[in-house]
Image: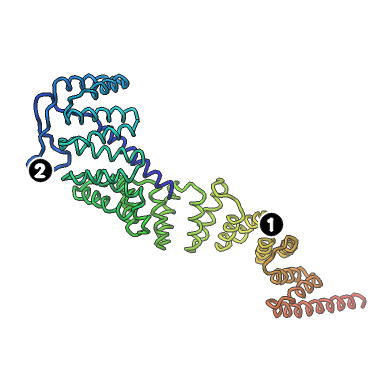
């Protein structure tokens, strides 16, 4: 989740930087003609009362033009010096000061001196009777600059001031506000503007931007609202079908306990060669086991281990063995279990290996595994191990050793009854064999 949120933030920061680069381009009115400037995103001159833009003196206009030419030629120090000279003029009008600081802001931004750019914009906004366009553009860009320096509280405060003087905001503004609240971990507040942005896009019949959907997705995640998160993910995979979004959707289905859907998505990605990480493949293997598809799990695990994507540790090897066993591939279940038992420090897996050998009627190997299990120790049910040992020894007709194993098992109350039954049976078989051998000897003599 952390990586995903970082990616969201990185994508949004890049968009903010681009927007700032465009918004900061200074535009000012000529020296002689007052003009009416329409605010971007407003309803237009007929629906909103506008302010007249003051004129600028020929002298100030000329000096700003000279500074602009220096800045555009990337002579930033000379351009800043020219602006500094103009700032020392004693009789600048409020409008001229505003335009002067607007140029300072643009230059500082270009030099990535964001704190200085912010201070310059604060100076622009401190001037009374600003033209609407200059005020709204300054507020909006100032909010973006606060976002860039990660002062999210100030970014939210400023963008809210911008909303107060803007009649018709765009979805980008709502996204900026939503991102600010998200960074402040105010997820409920974040959702309000993001939903407005989403509604605006849908009303136009457009496809929502990837970043808008990502922001909605992380808000719903942080609010544990997995149903709405799933709805957003469905749009992400429809419009921006990336493997990571499918994986996130699979994880969301897991949170909603819809494991069949989770398995279907992971299986689709695996078959498309897009489930490369070992832990992802292990997740799918476990889902196969849960949904009674052990053969698929075994094939996947075996392939993943051979490709060195899935680690051959005790847990994974045991899972592979179990998968083959449940798929009724008894012989194939042995190699991973043998390997796991060798890696294990206690005798539990050797005991399980002995059981597998007994199931395959390989009693000598079962006895050897049980001897190893006892030697390693750490057995949870040594009585059961002795029952198994007695059985295997009996099958290879080592009756005395078998009797000793069952006698040991009978000391545990949990196995006492079964062990005593076996003891009676082994003793009778031992006696029967003894009588049979004596009978054969007598016949040979006669």
Which callout, 2 or 1, points to the residue nearer the camera?
2
Q: Give whichever of 385, 62 is nearer the camera.
A: 62
Residue furthest to the right in view is 445
Q: Is residue 57 left or right of residue 5?
A: left
Q: Tag 2: Cα neighbours inside 10 Å, few (<14), some, or many (≥20)? A: few
Residue at the spot 76% in from the left edge and 73% down from the top edge: 408
Residue sitting at 52 percent across and 60 percent down? 294
Q: Is residue 230 above or below residue 78?
A: below
Q: Residue furthest front?
A: 90
Residue 202 appears in the rendering = yes
Image spot of residue 424 (x, y percent): 76, 80
Count residues near mark 1 (Cα–Cα under 10 Å), then give few for <14, some for 14-19, many for 20+. some
Element class at badge 2? loop
- The disc label shown at residue 48, or none: 2
Badge 1 is on which residue? 345
Q: How is the image coloured?
A: rainbow
Can you see residue 237? no
Q: Where residue 389 is drawn, which disc sits there? A: none
Asked which quadrant contains residue 48, the reply is top left
Residue 143 in percent (x, y) is at 28, 40
Residue 3 in the image, given as x and y percentages of width and height: 43, 46
Foreground residue among 376 and 200: 200
Which percent across, then down, holds residue 59?
A: 16, 20
SS at mark 1?
Answer: loop
Q: Quadrant of the C terminus?
A: bottom right
Q: CA distance from mark 2 to mark 1?
A: 80 Å
Mark 2 or mark 1: name the one nearer the start of the chain: 2
Residue that appears at 21% across and 46% down: 163
Q: Is 235 or 261 nearer to us in this picture? A: 235
């Amino acid at each position: 989740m952390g990586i995903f949120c970082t990616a969201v933030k990185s994508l949004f920061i890049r968009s903010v930087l681009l927007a700032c680069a465009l918004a900061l381009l200074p535009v000012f009115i000529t020296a002689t003609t007052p003009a009416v400037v329409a605010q971007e995103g407003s309803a237009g001159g007929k629906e909103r009362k506008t302010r007249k833009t003051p004129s600028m003196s020929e002298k100030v206009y000329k000096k700003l033009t000279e500074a602009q030419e220096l800045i555009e030629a990337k002579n930033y120090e000379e351009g800043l010096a020219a602006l500094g000279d103009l700032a020392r003029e004693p009789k600048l009008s409020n409008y001229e000061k505003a335009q002067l600081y607007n140029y300072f802001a643009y230059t500082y931004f270009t030099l990535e001196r964001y704190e200085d750019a912010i201070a310059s914009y604060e100076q622009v906004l401190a001037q009374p009777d600003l033209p609407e366009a200059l005020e709204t553009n300054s507020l909006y860009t100032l909010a973006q600059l606060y976002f860039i320096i990660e002062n999210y509280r100030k970014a939210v405060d400023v963008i809210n001031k911008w909303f107060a003087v803007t009649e018709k905001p765009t979805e980008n503004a709502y996204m900026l506000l939503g991102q600010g609240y998200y960074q402040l971990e105010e997820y409920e507040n974040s959702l309000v503007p993001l939903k407005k942005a989403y509604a605006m896009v849908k009303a136009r019949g457009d496809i929502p931007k990837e970043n808008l959907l990502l922001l909605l997705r992380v808000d719903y995640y942080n609010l544990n609202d997995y149903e709405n998160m799933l709805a957003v993910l469905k749009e992400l995979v429809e419009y921006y079908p990336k493997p990571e979004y499918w994986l996130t959707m699979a994880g969301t289905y897991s949170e909603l306990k819809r494991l069949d859907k989770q398995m279907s998505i992971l299986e689709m990605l695996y078959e498309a060669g897009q489930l490369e990480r070992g832990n992802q493949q292990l997740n799918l293997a476990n889902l196969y086991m849960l949904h009674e598809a052990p053969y698929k799990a075994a094939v996947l695990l075996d392939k993943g281990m051979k490709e060195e994507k899935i680690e051959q540790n005790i847990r994974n090897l045991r899972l592979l063995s179990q998968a083959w066993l449940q798929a009724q591939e008894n012989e194939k279940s042995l190699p991973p279990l043998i390997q796991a038992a060798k890696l294990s420090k206690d005798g539990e897996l050797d005991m399980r290996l002995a059981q597998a050998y007994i199931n395959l009627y390989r009693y000598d190997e079962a006895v050897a595994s049980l001897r190893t299990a006892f030697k390693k120790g750490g057995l949870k049910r040594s009585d059961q191990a002795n029952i198994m040992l007695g059985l295997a020894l009996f099958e290879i007709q080592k009756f005395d050793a078998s009797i000793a194993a069952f006698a040991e098992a009978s000391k545990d109350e949990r196995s006492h009854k079964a062990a005593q039954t076996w003891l009676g049976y082994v003793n009778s078989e031992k006696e029967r064999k003894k009588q049979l051998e004596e009978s054969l000897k007598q016949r040979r003599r006669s």
